[in-house]
Amino acid sequence: MSRRGRILLRTGIVLFVVGAGPLLAIIIAASLGLTHDPNPNPVGLGMLAGITFWPAVIMIVWGVVSIRHERNEPLAAPGPHRTTLLTRETPDLLSTREDTHDDQ
């Protein structure tokens, strides 16, 4: 594994847990009836989650791609549409052929 990929992946996961974790804990506690207010309004925790969510997702994706690139593994298995290559023997599909026109 690449060191850079591991660091990005771990940092992204920690950022996601630290940023969204407190807000999710308040939401779960309110839904279970553990808070005095059944509809809490944690503005600060919502802002923290909003600010840290996308950077965490980007770091997680970047870390996974970096690790896969280091291992030289494809992200998706090549399908049958990727196996054919255009060669010089491949006819030009955009050219017009005169023998296809019917002259009457």
Image (spheres, rainbow, N blue to C red):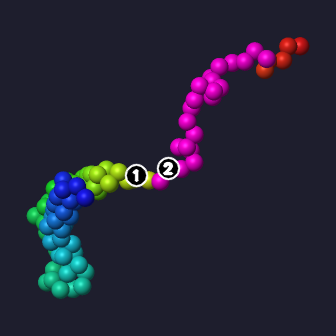
Mark 1, residue position: 74
Is 24 placed above or below 52 here? below
**Residue 90 drawn in magenta:** yes
Q: Residues within 10 Å of mark 1 (few under 14, many from 20)?
A: few
* Quarter that holds the N terminus: bottom left
Query: Disc 2 residue type?
Result: Pro
Q: What span is colored magenta in the figure?
A: 77-99
| Residue 21 located left or right of residue 85 | left
Residue shown at the point (38%, 53%) measured from the top left: 73
Q: Nearer the viewer, residue 4 or 72?
A: 72
Q: Which mark is residue 36?
A: none
- Count of numbered circles on the image: 2
Instruction: Tell me, yes or no, if residue 46 can be seen here.
Output: no
Is 7 placed above or below 100 here? below
Q: Which mark is residue 78?
A: 2
Dot 1 and dot 2 residues touching (CB under 8 Å): yes
Residue shown at the point (65%, 19%) measured from the top left: 95
Q: Residues within 10 Å of mark 2 (few under 14, many from 20)?
A: few
Instruction: Tell me, yes or no, if residue 69 can be seen here.
Output: yes
Q: Main secondary structure of the magenta part?
A: loop
* Quarter that holds the C terminus: top right
